[in-house]
Amino acid sequence: MASVHREKRNGKTRFRIQFYDKDKQRRSIRLAADTNKKGADARQAVFKRAVRKGLIDESPFAEVKGGSDCNESRLHFIDQGTIQKVLDAAPDAEWRAIIALARYGGLRTPSETLGLKWADIDWATDRFTVASPKTARQGKPSRLVPLFPELRPYLEELFDQAAPGSMYVIGRYRDKSANLRTQFQRIIQRAGVQSWERLYHNLRASRETELANEFPLHVVTDWIGNTPAVANRHYLQTVEQHFQQAIGKWNAAVGATVGAKVVQQWVPSATAPSRTMLQETRKPPAFTEVLLHGTSLTDSVRTYIIPPRGSELSQQSPGKSQFSSAGGAKSGAVGALIDTDLQAVVAAWPALPDAVKAGILAMIRAAKSE
């Protein structure tokens, strides 16, 4: 960090930079990275303007890098279980509405929350209009937001308690002396949950992260009131839910591959069974164990390789059921070897689109070639 001094030499205006002493340097280090970035950007803008106007020949900050304005350490995802405890600890309906508007509506607090009027809420169409002083400077004074199912009960509760003729949704805490941050800290402590930095911003960020999992980003940013670039840099987070979704999809993909192998055995043969097939059906049904991701050996999924439909066992083989193209699929003995999920796949096979069937068969062929 440094201080800038203006001086004239040989008829030219120059600026001399004097670096701070060690004590001041220590104080400057405590500033967050985004705070230092804002200060550096402001200084660069001032001196760049001075150069354009001919007041100075060059900017002393022309090559100074301000660093990053994104501080990921201050981003926190507040899950719905945590915020429910906070809502339960709120002292009244207005505080529950304040918290819900930030967490489930994505409103900026206090500016947008305190500016919300009852006339802005369209109960019939399940949406409400948010007046935004911040985005008004960019030519967008308001935005339309869905009346999300998680949010609606708290607004309805407050509406039922509102005095006739009330204009604003939040009425008791509009006084300038009301410190919504301090009181919110007390509510969080009363709820017995761990507090987080940037109390209201992280509620907005948590909501935007949730919505981005369900809707296109350009739609989400219209509802939240920022841009995709700002959302990606300062709002959206990678949370535990993403990892669970990824693992679940992976398991589903593996399970589909395994299931496809079994389904193929049930596809009726277009030709009469060969002698080799009849010999194979006399062997006891074999099974393989497939260990899916995240399971133990004892929880492994046993996939039985069922003899192809259409082959019929010899009557001389005692203790074995007969399979035929007409009745093999309905055999109780065979049905006992597969689980309900596989039975659902088999039942759905005739109605599956050709593209899906082709994909399943392609997986089977690929597995056979390994």
Image (cartoon, grey):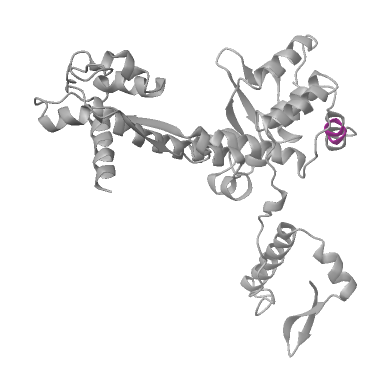
Specify the quadrant of the image occupied by residue 364. Answer: top left
Q: Is residue 225 visible in this depiction of the protein?
A: no
Q: In this view, does 253 lie to the left or right of 312?
A: right
Residue at the (73%, 81%) spot, across then down? 13
- 3 and 356: which one is in front? 356
Query: Residue 297 at what x, y percent from top left?
Result: 50, 38
Which range of residues does the magenta coloring cover?
185-189
Query: Residue 97 at what x, y percent from top left?
Result: 74, 23
Determine if the magenta segment contains residue 325.
no
Q: Is residue 188 visible in this depiction of the protein?
A: yes
Residue at the (59%, 48%) spot, across then down? 230
- 3 and 75: which one is in front? 75
- 358 and 148: which one is in front? 358
Specify the quadrant of the image occupied by residue 154. Answer: top right
Q: Main secondary structure of the magenta part?
A: helix
Query: Residue 326 at what x, y percent from top left?
Result: 18, 13
Say if 346 sits above or below 224 in the image: above
Determine if the magenta segment contains residue 188.
yes
Residue at the (25%, 43%) spot, across then down? 368
Residue at the (63%, 40%) spot, across then down? 135
Say if 144 sits above or below 156 in the image: below
Q: In this view, does 5 lie to the left or right of 121?
A: right
Q: Is residue 220 left or right of residue 75?
A: left
Specify the quadrant of the image occupied by residue 362. Answer: top left
| Quadrant location, the N terminus | bottom right
